[in-house]
Amino acid sequence: MGNRHDDTGTPRLSRRAFLGTTVAAGGITVLPVPPAVAQTPGAADSAPMPAAAGEPGRPGAPNAPVTLTVNGQRHQLALDVRTSLLDALRETLHLTGTKKGCDHGQCGACTVLLNGRRINACLTLAVMHQQDEITTIEGLERGGQLHPVQAAFIAHDGFQCGFCTPGQICSAVGMLREVADGVPSHASADLSGARTVSLQDLSEAEVRERMSGNLCRCSAYPNIVAAIRSAAGSQR
Ligand code: FES
Ligand code: FES
């Protein structure tokens, strides 16, 4: 049975011919491209544009000079201006302690400290942070001494595979500073600022809420929470 044509002259597949193309492709339906679409001049316009040398943000653009201060060290880099802070840390500076989980701001594996505040390094561009002090997991220990949060994670077995751990620890360090600064959370009883949460009474609910941006696929949460509460106690 051959193909028919509709009123406009466009060929239409018969039911039998349609099923034949499906089976022949191993279950994948292969639809014919109507000649009218295949020959549309605009189709060629959607092909990738050739590189335009010297145009920022396009293939072939020259790298820009970027200065980053990471763990107390200044680095003069040449980066594509679209480079995320995460990629600059991992791919250019080879500080691979900071992990790339989702690359979309959803897992917290890339958490680093920016002037002491926690951020997702995958959601920001390196070129935006030339005036900032960046601290990664590699920069938390001092003179061979682990940061109290690092030591607490070891003491409480706060990890399994360890992939999320650098982000968890950096996030916890930033979070404990927020608590010390009197920043409330959604779990805080008083949001007015009249009665703030202290490090001494940092409840499990407070820790879980404040750390909710850091996911652990191994579900090591009970030990992570215990480690953070222990570190909070040691910072009284
Ligand atoms: S890698 Fe940045 S939030 Fe997941
Ligand atoms: S310890 Fe494996 S993802 Fe958290």
Image (tube, helix red, strand yellow):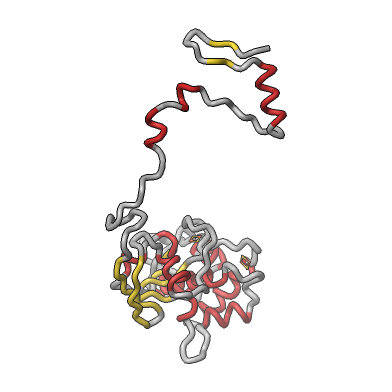
x and y percentages locating residue 1 in the rendered image: 68, 12
The total number of labels drawn is: 0
Residue at image point 49% right, 58% down: 103
Q: Position of residue 61 (x, y in %)?
A: 32, 59
Front one among 115 and 226: 115
Image side of residue 127 versus residue 28, left or right: left
Q: Is residue 25 left or right of residue 132?
A: right
Residue 131 image offset from top left, x and y in percent:
28, 73
Nearer to me, 28 or 173 = 28
Q: Residue at coordinates 41% horizontally, 27% vertically from top-left?
A: 40
Residue pictured at 66% horizontal, 33% vertical: 28
- Taking the image as shown, residue 79 lies to the left or right of residue 227, namely left
Name the spot of residue 229 as percent of width and height, x first. 55, 74
Seen at 46% across and 25% down, the residue is 37
**7 versus 222 height, above or below:** above
- Dividing the picture into quadrants, the one containing residue 130 is bottom left
Judge whether 109 appears above or below 95 on screen.
above
Q: Is residue 6 visible?
A: yes
Most foreground residue, 79 or 193? 79
